[in-house]
């Protein structure tokens, strides 16, 4: 037998080129005369399985508790404690995956790709915070989201960001959301996960570039409260809109605003809106003209948005491995490059016809092209809506937390003298009861 | 004042309507997905029939020590003396000196069973998932060595970063109930 092996190997060397061939039984497994037993290959079960439902239960519990703490207890300290717990549990213990921010991509993929079934747990992770936000405001962001929590810890010297800048930077989050949906729908990539800036901290390892981005965000976060939440988070974009119509909301004052302006600068996230004075007639007329111009301009904005993303779609589609592979194979076929890559070798080894690859790639490109058109129109209109919103004077009689921007952190509560009255009353009530 | 109050009730009514709409939308989404949801989680796994043992598995995992390890399907192995997964192809002499071993970490142990058969076992704590042995075994042997994501180590990232870097598209999402794709004893 030994001689047989020695004979076959040179033959095999000459027969099989460098290409990997599989499942060939060149040397029949032996029948041992000594009765040797084959060892068992071990297959350790997934550690994930145990936590599947525990995670959902913890999420549900944390969301309920967070809503209770924000709206009823109004205690920053307790919100902070829950936030720490979430950071430790969802972040450092469960390593930040799966999180509601990224779960949307699985849902989108499942809608567009008939062969992908999204796990039920992932659906719940995506939905529960949305439903809670519809009723209680962004209490998920307050004390449950591990990404928000890690940023909240470093808010030390928050400075105010001018309103126009904040509003403009927020467009990044919409762009991010759009690109993430587009790339998830076409099965190209999950960019929210790939560029999740804090997950490498939770795992204490990971891609170096992403680690650096995360570190930068945390450094910026010392001076600008929660930069990822305000300017980048794609899930936050959805939460903003739902929070606008929430049944209950965060209020700075427990009962009525006495316009003392003590809370004015208390929010590190620029979410407090002051009471308004009536506009002078001249301003009012000016804004009316501006509004009219903007409404006429809206289609132009939509069109230019579409044009912009149309140009970017070629670049976006390279996120899809098939498109990248087709590009590469095309280069090799046309003799523009002489070497090969692992991917092109693997493709050639698979025996799939090149034409088929090209067709697949151009189908994907067409889909991404169409998607980016829709996405561009959406962004264009969004800019229009933003401009229009800024030309309207909203009427407010007191200081309040902006429904969309307020992250329900509870920092402003203690600044309100009415809150102090409330706390005193509770204390007295407790003492009187004894 | 009365007008103000009216305004507020009206606004609340509209908000309630929109909220109802959103809830219905979310409900609809769940309804549409319910036929397509998998009861259990999925995990990432390598299809050994597609993997070309490129080496990315060792370097692209988010973990410091890759969750991918070499696995040996003993029933497929020929127990060859001249194992091309174990020895360098250019190894001049048939001895087990480190310079003749293919595995850069010395994770493969060779034990004598009976003439002329040797058994090869993998020390998982040493293996870094580089796939050098897999390539060798696939090229000239039975292909009994293959790479698998070890689920006691894997964090089950929502997007596996090795999958994103895999040149052959060998990564699949499979049900957590059967989380491995072992090599079968099929006769080729
Ligand atoms: S805005 Fe996004 S990252 Fe920030 S707390 Fe909310 S969900 Fe988390
Ligand atoms: S609770 Fe107050 S301090 Fe916190 S985000 Fe909302 S408005 Fe700002
Ligand atoms: S990256 Fe893909 S082809 Fe390379 S070793 Fe891993 S599974 Fe195999
Ligand atoms: S050659 Fe690479 S994959 Fe094979 S056992 Fe050694 S470290 Fe593991
Ligand atoms: S899912 Fe994550 S931990 Fe597991 S193999 Fe892939 S990158 Fe590594």
Image: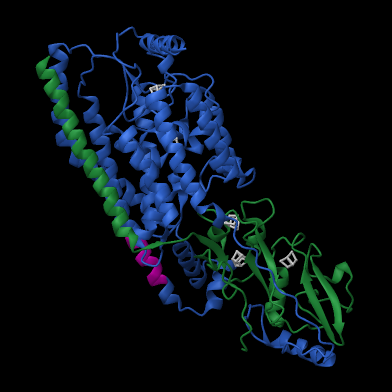
Chain colours: A blue, B green
Residue positioned 81% across, 75% down in the render = B87
Compared with residue A70, is residue B126 higher up or lower down, i.e. above or below? below
Residue A272 location, quadrant = top left
Compared with residue B141, is residue A398 higher up or lower down, i.e. above or below? above
Residue positioned 44% across, 26% down in the render = A409
Q: Is residue A110 visible?
A: yes
Residue A48 in the image: x percent, y percent?
A: 56, 55
The residue positioned farthest toward the left in the image shown? B3
The magenta stretch spans residue A366: yes
Decide whether the magenta segment is chiefly helix, strand or loop: helix
Q: Nearer the viewer, residue A16 or B102?
A: B102
The magenta stretch spans residue A5: no
The residue positioned farthest toward the front in the image shown? A434
Q: Specify the segment rendered in magenta.
A: A358-367
Residue B60 location, quadrant = bottom right
Image-based side of A60 in relation to A292, left or right: right
């Amino acid at each position: 037998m030994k001689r047989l092996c020695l004979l076959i190997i040179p033959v095999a060397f000459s027969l099989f080129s460098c290409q990997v061939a599989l499942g060939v039984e060149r040397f029949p497994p032996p029948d041992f005369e000594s009765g040797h037993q084959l060892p068992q290959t071990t297959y350790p079960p997934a550690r994930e399985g145990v936590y599947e439902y525990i995670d959902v239960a913890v999420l549900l519990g944390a969301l309920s508790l967070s809503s209770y703490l924000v709206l009823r207890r109004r205690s920053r300290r307790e919100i902070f404690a829950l936030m720490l717990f979430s950071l430790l549990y969802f972040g450092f213990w469960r390593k930040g995956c799966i999180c509601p921010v990224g779960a949307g991509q699985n849902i989108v993929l499942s809608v567009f790709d008939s062969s992908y079934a999204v796990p039920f747990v992932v659906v719940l992770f995506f939905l529960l915070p949305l439903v809670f936000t519809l009723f209680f405001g962004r209490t998920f962001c307050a004390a449950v989201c591990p990404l928000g929590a890690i940023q909240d810890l470093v808010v030390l010297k928050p400075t105010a960001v001018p309103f126009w800048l904040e509003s403009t930077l927020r467009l990044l989050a919409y762009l991010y959301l759009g690109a993430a949906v587009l790339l998830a729908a076409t099965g190209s990539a999950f960019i929210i996960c790939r560029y999740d800036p804090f997950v490498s901290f939770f795992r204490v390892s990971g891609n170096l570039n992403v680690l650096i981005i995360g570190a930068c965000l945390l450094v910026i976060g010392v001076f600008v409260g929660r930069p990822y939440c305000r300017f980048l988070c794609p899930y936050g974009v959805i939460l903003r809109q739902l929070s606008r119509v929430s049944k209950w909301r965060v209020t700075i004052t427990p009962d009525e605003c006495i316009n003392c302006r003590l809370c004015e600068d208390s929010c590190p996230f620029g979410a407090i809106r002051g009471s308004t004075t009536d506009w002078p007639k001249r301003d009012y007329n000016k804004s009316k003209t501006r509004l009219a111009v903007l409404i006429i301009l809206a289609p132009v904005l939509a069109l230019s948005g579409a044009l912009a993303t149309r140009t970017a779609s070629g670049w976006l589609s390279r996120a899809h491995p098939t498109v990248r592979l087709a590009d590469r194979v095309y280069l090799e076929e046309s003799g523009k490059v002489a070497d090969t890559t692992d991917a092109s070798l693997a493709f050639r080894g698979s025996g799939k016809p090149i034409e088929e690859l090209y067709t697949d790639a151009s189908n994907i490109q067409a889909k991404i092209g169409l998607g980016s058109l829709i996405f561009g129109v959406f962004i264009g209109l969004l800019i229009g809506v933003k401009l229009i919103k800024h030309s309207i004077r909203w009427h407010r009689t007191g200081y309040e937390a902006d429904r969309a921007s307020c992250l329900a952190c509870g920092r402003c509560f203690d600044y309100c003298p009415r809150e102090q009255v409330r706390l005193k009353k509770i204390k007295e009530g407790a003492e009187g009861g004894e | 004042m009365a007008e103000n109050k009216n305004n507020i009730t009206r606004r609340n009514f509209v908000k309630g309507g929109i909220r109802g709409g959103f809830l219905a939308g979310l409900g609809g989404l769940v309804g549409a997905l319910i036929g397509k949801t998998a009861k259990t989680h999925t995990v990432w796994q390598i299809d050994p029939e597609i993997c070309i043992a490129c080496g990315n598995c060792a370097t692209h995992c988010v973990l410091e020590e890759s969750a991918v390890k070499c696995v040996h399907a003993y029933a497929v192995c020929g127990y060859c003396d001249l194992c091309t997964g174990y020895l360098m192809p250019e190894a001049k002499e048939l001895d087990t000196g480190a310079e003749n071993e293919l595995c850069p970490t010395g994770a493969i142990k060779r034990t004598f069973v009976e003439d002329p058969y040797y058994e090869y076992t993998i020390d998982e704590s040493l293996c870094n998932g580089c796939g050098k042995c897999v390539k060798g075994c696939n090229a000239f042997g039975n292909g009994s060595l293959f790479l698998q994501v070890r689920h006691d180590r894997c964090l089950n990232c929502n997007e596996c970063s090795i999958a994103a870097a895999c040149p052959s598209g060998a990564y699949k999402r499979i049900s957590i109930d059967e989380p491995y794709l072992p090599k079968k004893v099929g006769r080729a």
